Amino acid sequence: MRLVLVADTHVPKRARDLPAAVWAAVEAADVVIHAGDWVDEPFLDRLEARSARLIGVYGNNDGPALRARLPEIADADLDGLRVSVVHETGPATGREPRCQDRFPGRDLLVFGHSHIPWDTVTPAGLRLLNPGSPTDRRSQPYATYMTATVAGGALTETVLHRVPR
């Protein structure tokens, strides 16, 4: 199962659209995960239309229309991999124990908010992934997104992609 992970797209406020490389990855994926800060409901419609399956949550920049359509936290079983998605996890310091306590029994937590890529594993085995932002790199050298592969209930490959400028 092929996944695409994005967050903090802020379309059309910070970018007019997703980069072409991200759209190509979306169209090739079995599941697209968006960890919030869409900003615009028509963008949600477009991503839904171009995704085989979309799992998304709202973020702090998402207004009432998006919050009516998206949960704060999404849970899914992807080929036996127990996944949760949330926009914000708080400060980087203490993130692993805080998320481990908040999301027990999960294998993977995808989050956003910071625009900073993140990939760690808690002592209990919860993998934490933040794909960064494909449209608003902020203090990062590159805009980014992630792809991953799930097989037999495990995340078998995770790649952080730099978006060409």
Image (cartoon, rainbow, N blue to C red):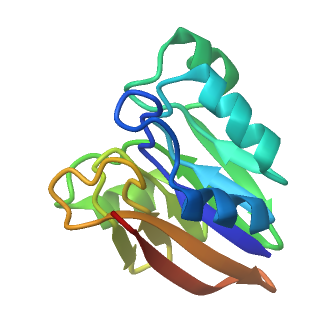
Which quarter of the picture shows residue 119? bottom left
Residue 12 placed where, x, y %?
45, 29
Could you tell whether 35 is left or right of 157 in the image?
left
Q: Is residue 23 above or below residue 57?
A: below
Quadrant containing the C terminus in the rendered view: bottom left
Residue 3 horizontal/vertical position (percent): 68, 68
Seen from the viewer's position, the closer of residues 51 and 103 is 51
Counting from the top left corner in percent of width and height, residue 69 is at 69, 22
Q: Name the image quarter holding residue 70.
A: top right
Asked whether the viewer can see residue 95, the reply is: yes
What residue sits 56% from the left and 65% below the top?
Answer: 21
The image shows residue 128, relative to residue 88, as above or below, that is below
Residue 11 lies left or right of residue 151; in this view the side is left
**Quadrant where the image shows the N terminus:** bottom right
* Residue at 84% across, 54% down: 52
Closest to the observer, 10 or 5: 10
Residue 109: x and y in percent read 52, 61
